[in-house]
Structures are given as structure tokens and as C-alpha cells.
Image (spheres, rainbow, N blue to C red):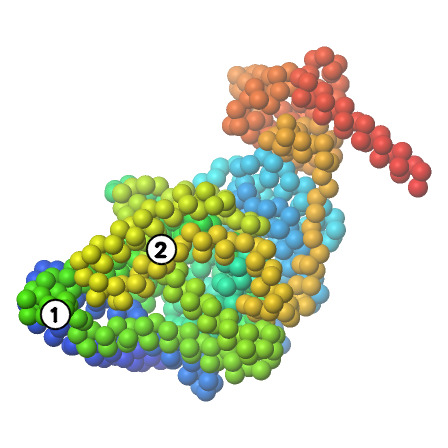
Amino acid sequence: MNADFSFLTRLAFQRRLLLACGTVALVLLAALPMARMLAAGGWTAARIVFFALFLLLFAQVVFAFLVAGIGFWVLRTGRHSLRIADLSPLEPPPMPLPATAIVMPVHNEEVERVFQGLRAMYVSLQKHAGADAFDFFILSDTDDPNHWIAEEKAWLELCKEVGGFGRIFYRKRRMQLHHKSGNIADFCRRWGASYRYMIVLDADSLMTDSVFVRLAALMERNPGVGIIQTTTYPMLGQTLFQRIEQFSAAVYRPVITAGLNFWQLMDASFWGHNAIVRLKPFMEFCALPELPEVGPLGTRILSHDTIESALMRKAGYQVWQTCDADGSYEETPPHLLASLQRDRRWCHGNLQHLWFLFERGIRTTSRFNILNGILAYANAPLWLLSILLGSLIALRSATAAAPARPGGFQPAVNSAGLYAGVILLLLTPKILGAAIFLRSAEQVRRCGGRARVILGMVLETIYSFLLGPILMLFYTRFVLASFRGIPAKWGRQIRSDDEGPRWSVWLAFHWQNTLLALAALYWVAWLNPALLPWLIPVFIGPLVALPLSKITASARLGRAAKVRGWFLTPVETAPPPDLATFGEPFTLPVQPFFLAPQYVPDYGLLQAVLDPYLNSLHVSMLRLRKEGVSLTREYLSLLANRLLSAGPLALTPAEKTTLLWDSDAMLFMHQTLWSSPAAHLHEWWQAAFRHYVETSELSVRRIATL
């Protein structure tokens, strides 16, 4: 392994040097004419800042262009692809496989969807000879009692259905400390010593059994590897927004992934899900530190994954990304609003990585990955600033040239050439991805034929053209909000939404950016209409953002596009047979009476107190209360009696949650509810109890007549 590591180090240096030289050469090729243009009007502070921004932003465009070009060459020729699977043979996989935990952190997720995916993955894995090595863990940070009780019920139903007792575990964390990273850390402290590897999933993740086994086998064959990140592809999209996203990933992502693998090799990044982690070094070296409580980016890290991969590399372990394995999937947000709500948190988390950019011991490539994550959002205000400065410079040049050229300012030929060059560089990764995709007759057939694929590419490019400026404005606001100290909340992610938000919601969401674009458009048209053709790509997106967001958020239009064969993906038309059971819905029986408006807010609490089956289940999953002070017992008894006599509205959400966490209180309330006269109970409990008894008796009679 040491020889391989030395070989990889030399190879990685050569490839990165080649990529760096290519980037510098192309940047210089564009920088010289830009410098001559700016110098013609005399160097000012605005021109110097604009030139610096041009170099920084153009370098990133060139780098992405070269990565895509290398990825195209690798996929087209099959040469120099060097993947982690090439380091050691994988056939047959080592048996028996080591103990591996498959963990899924959840937070107020759609219960049926989560357990539908878990069932599909568990059933798929049981068909494999190495299934005994894998255990599943649902790690709940849910703070909604309705979801909490539903998760417990779904866990029990799933275990009964697939025989998963002792293989599928559910853990509800009492203290929601440090969000997802804290949830994973808590698992590592409690159970990490029992497993060699941990496969981390998101609540919307799907992976086939072959990927689970392959990841464990790769880790076993390569003891110097700490993390293997799979390349995930979106699937199961219903809205037009999701369908465009998954089509884009299917067509363009392979080229980008192959290019990234070419230069990253063992220095890949970690996305925090759909990946396998070697637990011992992860627990030893990857604990996230608390940030200094100085400035707006202090306290706890929100985005943990990139830092964890950097710490793993600092410890001497390799981090790889697979670029050749199918079977790793995820879902995307259903519309732009949900996507931007997630991006707000990611933006703040990535900006916090500034604390680690110059951390001692971090490898150079890890620093580059950290910087790349920061610039994913920080680029937005930089692009906006460069557009503003460029416009001001052009307007001043027009004013200065007005006496000599009454017709107004005309952009220089060199400027037009640079403009066209940037557009071409931005489009090239899409063109190369499309070229590789269209070479596969099978993929094209699965996507409805060449004409539909090309139509999808054209429409997706237009959509990206409109979406880019919209994201630029929102990301700029996110960056400014983070530096102003406005906290980014870790809330429930929106996974599905049939028709999306109402028009009024979209109007409230977009009106500021639309008004800003209208004002800027009027300002430019008034001062110098000759600039409009150059700036219209920036204006048009925010101007049409409202209808564009509403239309793409529609699941009805998404389904109509699917019927017509638009934005189809290969995995959609020919889904993996390993996940065939995912098509079978996972439903929990619900009595309509308990979903009446007066019961919906406290439906979980109602079930856990009233139903003997669910009360026993819930109590069995709680820790027994240690002998405490009498004051605590009296307080809990007071809350329990008040809940039964005055109804749930008499307690705060925190008080009801406190009762749900106490096994003695839950047993006491259940016994009191079933043994007390109706007059001693609040009418809310009386009605619910009466209906429950009547429904149970009716069910017994029906069973007796069978």
C-alpha cells in the first residue's frame, strides 16, 4: 500500500501541474487583451478591482472547462481513468465482509417515504450473500411528536414485515446537539466500536445492494482509504424542477466526475451522504472542533463533510470518489424555494470553512476543496460586483467618448471576443457531456430517442441561462446575511410538494430581485442603450423569475412532461431491479377520526397515551427514569394530570415533549385514561377514547365473522 500511495502522490502532482499550467495559460491569453482595453482609458481603482475580479472569476471558468475537457477525453478514449477499483482486484469480494453500519439521520422527515426507501434497500441487500455484515440504524433528531410516534410505529411495522428485528434499529436522540454531525457523532460514541465501517445515508437516499457490498469490499481491499464517496444521481423527480435537475445530472455529471477523478485521485471531497467511512480513524481524527465565538461565522460548523474529508487526509488516509459505479441515488428539492432554503444553510456552513482554509496540517488539495466550497456561494457577490464595475467603466468610457462619437459608446471588438469566449467556455461542459451521452444508443433509447434528448438539452440550457442570474442575486443575499450575523436555521427539508407554493408566496419571494432588475434595466437604458445587449442575460432571469418558479414547481406539468418523453433519464425508464420493491408504498394505518382538525396537532401524543399497543411500544423505547428528586416526580405528575383533565391545549409543546420522554408518566397517563370515570377527563380525551373503543369493538366483530 505504501508503494501505491507513493505512486499516486507522484501521479497526482503531475496531473495537477498539467491542469494548473493549462489554467494559467488560458487565463493569460484572456488577461492580456483585457488589460490592454482597461489601460486604454487609464488605470483607476475601479479598473484595477475589475481586472482582479476578472482574473479570479475567469480562472474558475477555465478550470471547469479543463476539468470537463479532461473528463471527456477520459471517457472517450478510456485512458488514464485510474479509479479506486483499479488499485486492487474486487472479484470476488472478500468474505465474510466486516461489520458495517448503514446509518440514516432523520429530522421531521416524511415517515412513509423514509421507511419505503429503507425497506427497498434492506430487502435488496438480503438477497446478497454478505447481507449479515450490515445493520441499519435510523438516527432520529425529530422534534415533532407526531413524526416521532409515527417513526416508532413505522420501525416496528418494517421490522415485522421484513424480519428486521436485531438488524434494523431505531434511536431517538433526546438532545439535538449540533444537528446532523452531532447525530452521527452520538452514534459513533455509542456503537462505533462495534463496526469497522459506516455507510452514511440521507433521508432521501437510495442505494442498491451491489453498491453497499462493493463499498465495503473496496474499503477492505484498501486499508489506507478512509472515505469513499459515491457519485449520486437524482431520481424519482415529480415536479418540472426536479425533472430538469435529474436530466441535467444524467447527461452532464459523468464528464465532470471523470474529470474530477483525473486530478483529485485520493484527495476527493466528502458530501456527507451516500458514502462509506472507516470508523476508527473517523472517530479518532475527524471530530469537529467548536469555532471561536468571534464574528458572525463562529460557534458550530453547519457543513461538516468537507472538513471531515480534510481531517481524514490530514491523518494520512485517502479519500476517493467513485466515478464508475451506478446504484447510488438521491432526491432533489421539489422547487426553487425549497432548494434555496437548503442553500441558505449550506452557504453559511461553507463560509464557516474560512476558519480552516489556513489551518495547520491541512493538505493543499484539501485547502483547494475548501476554497472551492466557499466560492460556490461567494462567487455570486463577486460576479455581481464585476458586472456593476464593468457597467460603470463602460458608461464612463461612453461619456468620455461622447464628443468624438455622438452615436454613443460601442463596445470594442476585443470585448465582444472575450464575451463570446466566456459564454463558449461556460457551455463547453454541457456540449462535451451531451456528446458522451449521445454516443450510447442504449441511453438515448431509454430517454425517448435522440430528438427528445437534444430537445431536453436545449431546454435545460435555456433554463440554466435564466436560472443563473436568479441564483446570483439570492446567493449574494445569503453571503451578506451570513456576514451580518443572521443565523441560518437547520429546519426540515421539503422533499415533496405537489403544486408548489401559491403565487403570493412566489411574489413575496421574488419581488425584491425583480424590482432591482427592472430598476437596473431602466437605468442602463436611460444612460446608454448600447449596453443593453451585453447586460440582458443578467436582467432576463430575475424578470421572469416569478412565472418560471411557479411553472417549474408544478408536479402536474412534471408528469405531463414525462408522458411526452421530455427530460427522461435512463434510471427512470429502466430502474434498478434491486430497488423494485421501492414502488410498493409503505403506508401506516390511520383512523380518519383522529385526523380531524382538533386532533391533528397532537395526534402522536394521543396515540402514545391512548393506544395500548403504541403506548407499550413507545415506553419500551424510552430509558427508565433513574430515581430522582421528589420535586421532579411531582412536576411530571402535575403535567400528566393537567394534560388529562384540561386537554393538550393546557400544556406548552415543551411540556408535552417532556411527558413523552418519561416512561413513568406515559404509563401513568395510559392507566389513568383507561381506569378513570369520563367525568374526570377533558372532553377532548372523552371523545377520542369513546371513538377508539367503538372502533376496536367493531374491528373485533368483523374478525369474529370471518
Query: Which quadrant: the C terminus?
Result: top right
Q: Is residue 52 left or right of residue 674?
A: left
Residue, disc 1: 38
Element under disc 2: helix
Q: Nearer the viewer, mark 2 or mark 1?
A: 2
Q: Which mark is residue 542?
A: 2
Q: Is residue 10 visible?
A: no
Q: Is residue 192 left or right of residue 73?
A: right
Q: Position of residue 246 (x, y in %)?
A: 52, 64
State which quadrant residue 390 falls in: bottom left
State which quadrant residue 419 falls in: bottom left
Most foreground residue, 647 or 360:
647
For the residue marked with disc 2, what is the amino acid? Pro
Q: Can you say whether 631 is above or below 96 in the image?
A: above
Which residue shows up at 55% across the image and 65% down it? 328
Q: Is residue 146 left or right of residue 610?
A: left
Q: Position of residue 473 (x, y in %)?
A: 32, 53
Mark 2 vs mark 1: which is more N-terminal? 1
Q: Can you say whether 142 is above or below 556 in the image?
A: above
Which residue shows up at 55% across the image and 74% down it? 452
State which quadrant residue 528 falls in: bottom left
Q: Is residue 653 visible?
A: yes
Q: Position of residue 122 (x, y in %)?
A: 66, 58
For the residue marked with disc 1, what is the amino acid? Leu
Q: CA distance from mark 2 to mark 1?
A: 29 Å
Q: How packed is label 2: few (under 14 Cα within 10 Å), some, or many (20 or more)? A: many
Which residue shows up at 53% across the image and 20% down it? 632
